[in-house]
Amino acid sequence: MTSFRPAPAWLADAVFYQIYPQSFADSNGDGIGDFNGITERLDHLAWLGVNTVWINPCFVSPFRDAGYDVSDYLSVAPRYGTGEDLAKLVDLAGRRGIRVLLDLVAGHTSDEHPWFTASANDRDDQRYIWTSQGCPDGFVPSPGSRPGAYLPNFFDSQPALNFGYARENPAEPWRLPVDAEGPRANREALRTIMDHWVRLGVSGFRVDMAASLVKDDPGKVATSALWTELRHWLDRTHPEAVLLAEWGEPDVSVPAGFHADFFLHFGGPADGLALRSLWSNREGTVNEDWDPLDCFFDAIGRGSPRPFIEAYHQASTSLGSSGFISLPTANHDFSRLNCGPRTAEQLPVAFAFQLTWPTLPAIYYGDEIGMRYVPNLPDKEGSVIGPHYNRAGSRTPMQWDDGPNAGFSTAPADALYLPLDPSPDRPTVAAQRADETSLLHRVRRLIALRARTPELGSGAAVEVLHSGYPFVYVRGGRCLVVVNPQRDEVRHAYDGPVVGRPLEVSGVTVDGGTITADGFGFGIFELAEDREVTLS
């Protein structure tokens, strides 16, 4: 494994909160969320206890893919405000102990980026991947005077930046090596972009499609080498900044140079099985190629945590202390926890697991109050990517209160970025702040418990005692965790150390050598004596 500077100390205690800026809070009444709206809601995040915010792409863009089609990496999109507004947000968040990460789209630009418009009219330009003539499968005809076609990275409007090919092929003369002029210029551009924003106060980046850069790259060897080069530069230049990968294979991405990687519902071992087997159910954002799964966190009780456990142990053993795995509740690309047949009463047990497992938790905005995936919405800025895959349902406006537009915006309802959840009983921050039994208060208590209990953090050992219903494990030799995500009561024989005081419990008892867990119950207990476990 390549030797890097150790990750900044703050990362080990990070609790991420992902903000989709279009939908979080609108300060100027145009129906679209913005930087000042986020700033006005920082007290909510500080009260909740999250300490690191990741904001989806906020750069200049034609928004054919909700900002993942960047046309200027060094300027913010006017719909979100100004550069000064972002700087104010970063500063005021920092005063509350909250770091801000931006989303870096590294592998492609918009077809409206000046780099691309220049490249489309200059047959010698190497910033993108071009054929000189014809239009092979997967390519898109040139929109400019340059003959031939270009390779997109996702949508046709997102031309792939040229970081080279790992292998030559005489039949495909457009393949350039990774050390060609264009790939070198693009690597330098990534450094320029990152340097610009870190110097303005951001604490790092979540990197979109991080594995997509070098093409035809078996084992991602050349792509890993590229990120290794960038990580060494970051370590020298900005040692407190971090890189999070959208890669889905921590045992590949972290040795390559990322400080952390997410378990995702796609990509990685078994095509995202680790996360989908937990709670990414078959509603809302479904790839037709995926095998049907019974999620462990579904009420029917037919799932298993074993795929997740196995993937976690494989990755964590490979990483050792070199980096981190992050476990998200959801994100802008896949369905929320509250989706399909899953109901609000099932959510506390999911958070009890997420906030006590030795991964870095990532909470998607609104999941802390149980916002639901909203089906049957129109395509919005490229949200639809398949017949059963519409991401708009996970991108609806944040529900702050029971006022007009749920407190998100003063705009007319038909001017909102996306429609609100129409349910009359939709959850709101205000209602749950007033109810100490609510999911919001539960999540807050769990975050606080994790923060003050090192044995529940990312660096302490985990020992699985039972990988079924209930799921039982010990953290750091000092804390017993029991979660039962199904609707039926279950019992499990327990012969471990004496259980001491409860730390956060709902429907779980340990008595006479038996654990009894109500349906959707969970319990976190302090052990009366240490249990010797090895880090895993």
Image (spheres, rainbow, N blue to C red):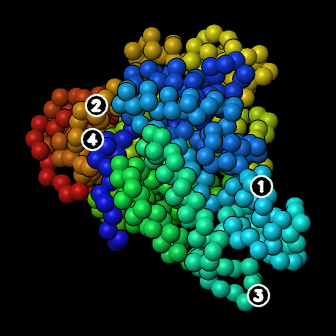
Q: In which quarter of the image is residue 171?
A: bottom right
Mark yes or no: residue 466 visible. Answer: no
Q: Nearest the camera: 350 or 223?
A: 223
What residue does disc 3 label?
171
Q: What is the total number of numbered labels drawn onto the structure image?
A: 4
Upstream in the sequence, badge 2 or badge 3?
A: 3
Q: Nearest the camera: 98 or 251?
A: 98
Upstream in the sequence, badge 1 or badge 4?
A: 1
The residue type indicated by label 3 comes to: Ala
The numbered mark at residue 456 is 4
Q: Looking at the image, which residue is at 70% across and 71% down?
A: 126
Alpha-carbon distance for marks 1 and 4?
Answer: 46 Å
The reply, left or right, for residue 404 in relation to residue 118 is left
Query: Residue 153: where, in percent of width, then height?
Result: 70, 61
Q: Mark 1 or mark 3: which is in front?
A: 1
Q: Look at the image and tell me in which quarter the N terminus lies.
A: bottom left
Alpha-carbon distance for marks 1 and 3?
Answer: 26 Å
Looking at this rendering, what residue extends furthest in the left direction?
529
Alpha-carbon distance for marks 2 and 1?
Answer: 47 Å
Query: Residue 367: where, in percent of width, then height?
Result: 52, 31
Alpha-carbon distance for marks 2 and 3?
Answer: 59 Å
Query: Residue 33: where, in percent of width, then height?
Result: 64, 27
Q: Nearest the camera: 176 or 419?
A: 176
Q: Looking at the image, which residue is at 87% across and 62% down?
A: 144
What residue does disc 2 label?
449
The residue type indicated by label 1 comes to: Asp
Disc 4 is placed on an element classified as helix
